[in-house]
Amino acid sequence: MSPCGSAGSRFCRLPIFFALVALGSESLAAGTPAGTVIENTATVSFDVGGTPLSVDSNTTTLTVDERIDVTVTVQSPQVLVAANDTNRELLFTVTNTGNGTETFQLAIDSVIAGNDFDPVPAVPAIYFDTDGSGDFNVGDQAYTPGSNDPVLLADESVDVFLINDIPGTVLNGQIGRSELTATSATGTGAPGTEFAGQGDNGVDAIIGTTGGEAADLGEYLVSEVAVSVTKAQAVTDPFGGSEPLPGSTITYTITVEVTSTGTASTSVLSDAIPTFTTYVPNSMTLNGSPLTDAADADAGEFNTAGIPSVVVQLGDLTQTDGIQTIVFEVQID
Amino acid sequence: MKKVIGVLLILACASTAVAAEGHLNVRTVVQKETVRLDDGGAVQTELVSADTVVPGENVFYTITFQNISEEPADNVVITNPIAESLTYLDGSAFGPGAEIRFSVDGGHTFAGLDELTVIEDGEERTATADDVTHIRWRMQEALAAGAQGVARFAAVLN
């Protein structure tokens, strides 16, 4: 890890002395590297008959063993899914928190007690976030146990996807979990378990507080949302009637309502202006409140790119939001 | 002519302290704790000799010194640096009959830990155990011929 990396950049402008102090305590999050030799010599000074003398002690030597530790941390928040979804990803970070280079084996478990349904691991089910995008892409490399087990330096981490399909039988609001486990290839065991000579450069490897194995759960939430949309029109002609004549105004009333549990995320109502009609500027309202035609801070926009349309951002809608009513007018050409 | 050389050597000795194996015998050992259950099932902690250590583990240094000369040793001062990869454990320095002082500047100045300051991110703050670079034990009385003393401290591997 570079001491001038993002975490340590504030030290880079400081004089060398402080940079060294910072290195001692902050950059070695995983601890003193395996194989480091720590020597200690005490010095005693004294006077005999007024003559100052000094003597050094013997030098003790400690060799730093490799401590095997690993963490797995889910990065994805709860992932919203629907029945029969395929290749739904969960992102995890595997970090070598030991003080030596270590190889880790990865495993998926999607049969987790206590949840509502079991996601079905894809084949293969484990991928590296090879392109570092945080999203599962075609360029991401599949993990093959024993073939490309991640080899992590002390403090190094790798992002890993678990890929599951969602069964067709799931119901709205159900939760299914999937677990990624990372296991030290050297071994696992109770903290303090020793693997003689199996650390970096032949030092002993000692199992740390994590036991040499770590796991974390990701979560899928079935969130199928039923949304009801209705559209009504009323015509007012220039003569006080309701005939669709040139110059008549058509008032459209569109209602949007979530009729199930779940959330319709970042809902957008988009309605094209009929041909042979012209949108009446600034006629748009949402739940009775006027919306401007410009693409600005309010939810509404009259979009003239391509087919002219009324576009209203409704945000995250749930049943409790009730009926959203959008009204706008057009004039018949 | 030989006598003149002898005088010069003595002068040299007086100006800088020199190695003096013949007066004080100084030994250092490093140990770590092991925990075991005794026959009665109680947890027993004992110190054992340490060759290896892992991050987060505590190590215990013991310095013993004995005056093996026929004369008392005055102003006995033991100085021990804290290795870069170790952090001194607050309150662990121990030495019967010694005044204990610390350095946080690489051994240039020594004082009580609460009297020392360091500069971090451009701001001065009171030093803590994490900052200690050296420990010094100053014996309050002369070490009589044949007498011995001990100085101890503990540290944790970063």
Image (cartoon, rainbow, N blue to C red):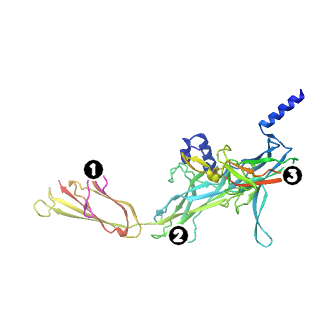
Out of A238 and A173, give the one closest to the viewer.
Answer: A173
- Picture coordinates of residue A250, whole percent (x, y): 19, 60
Q: Are marks 3 and 1 on the same chain?
A: no
> Can residue B121 be seen from the camera position used here?
no
Both marks 1 and 2 on one chain: yes
Indicate left or right for A274 with A194 as reference.
left
Q: Position of residue B150 (x, y in %)?
A: 79, 54
> Rounded to the nearest whole Å, what is the CA distance between mark 3 and mark 1?
101 Å
Circle 1 residues within 10 Å: few <14, some 14–19, many ≥20:
few
Q: Nearer the viewer, mark 3 or mark 1?
A: 3
Residue A304 numbered tag:
1
- The amino acid sitting under disc 3 is Gly
Residue A230, picture quadrant: bottom left
Label disc, if present, on residue B146 of the rendered structure: 3
Residue placed farthest to the left in the image?
Answer: A239
Say if the magenta span includes residue A299. Answer: yes
Taking A127 as reference, is A65 left or right? right
Mark 1: secondary structure: loop
Report the residue marked by disc 2: A117
